[in-house]
Image (cartoon, rainbow, N blue to C red):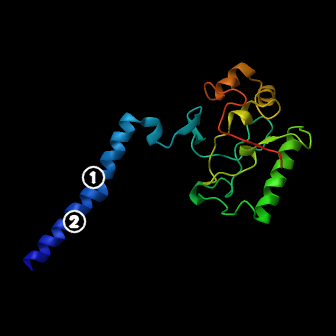
Amino acid sequence: MKESVRALLIFLVFSVAAGIAYPLGITGLARLFFKEKATGSLVTDQGRAVGSALIGQKFTGARYFHGRPSANDYDAANSGGDNFGPANRKYLEEVAGRVKKTRSENGLGPDAPVPADLVLASASGLDPHISPEAASSRRLGLPLPAALSRRPSKVLSYLRPRGATRGNSRGSMCSG
């Protein structure tokens, strides 16, 4: 009986230490030293959280940069891709539809290349990042959002990664 009580006591002590004290301590240190990251990299507008810099959102208006498509409709509670292979007919139809829609929305010709990250979903389905090609290409990037949001292109150019120029990225183009 004495050993059972000791075992229960050790279990409770380690449960509290590992399940409560350690997570609270690490969270406290993270908030102290990495406030932005520890709180989910939240994006605020007039003090109100409107999203996260790490999770894509569905922007449909012409005045916004369009992020990568999502296989799960940007649901952060349901992260994951569609698991279709590159030769899957349904996948190819979806991508072809996205290419057609992107060309149509941006006034591009039927053979104009489209940045791949605007038509291919990320593995998590939540990636908000687009390549410099997508952000700075003539019709898909700065001039249109700048004109529609009434912000000068010079201000919006700061949204591009530093040192990024056309043709200088990890992205690729999709002609499909």
Q: Residue furthest left?
A: 2
Q: Secondary structure at mark 1?
A: helix
Q: Please state which amino acid type lies under the numbered disc 2.
A: Leu
Question: In the image, residue 32 lies at what x, y percent?
Answer: 36, 36
Task: Please state which of residues 137 and 79 is positioned toward the viewer in this rendering.
Answer: 137
Rendered image: mark on residue 12: 2
Q: Residue at x 72, y 31 (%)?
A: 167
Q: Secondary structure at mark 2?
A: helix
Check the image and report above or below for 8 versus 64: below
Check the image and report above or below for 148 versus 111: above
Task: Please state which of residues 103 and 14 is positioned toward the viewer in this rendering.
Answer: 103
At label 1, counting other C-alpha atoms closer than 10 Å, the crowd grade (few under 14, some 14-19, many 20 or more) is few
User: Horizontally, is 64 left or right of 26 in the view?
Assistant: right
Q: Would you identify the image quadrant in which residue 90 lies?
A: bottom right
Question: In the image, residue 91 lies at what x, y percent?
Answer: 76, 61
Task: Please state which of residues 103 and 156 is positioned toward the viewer in this rendering.
Answer: 103
Q: Would you identify the image quadrant in which residue 79 lies?
A: bottom right
Question: In the image, residue 84 lies at what x, y percent?
Answer: 70, 63
Question: In the image, residue 25 lies at what x, y percent?
Answer: 30, 46
Q: Residue at x 83, y 32 (%)?
A: 139
Check the image and report above or below for 76 versus 44: below
The image quadrant where one finds the N terminus is bottom left
- Mark 1 lies on residue: 21
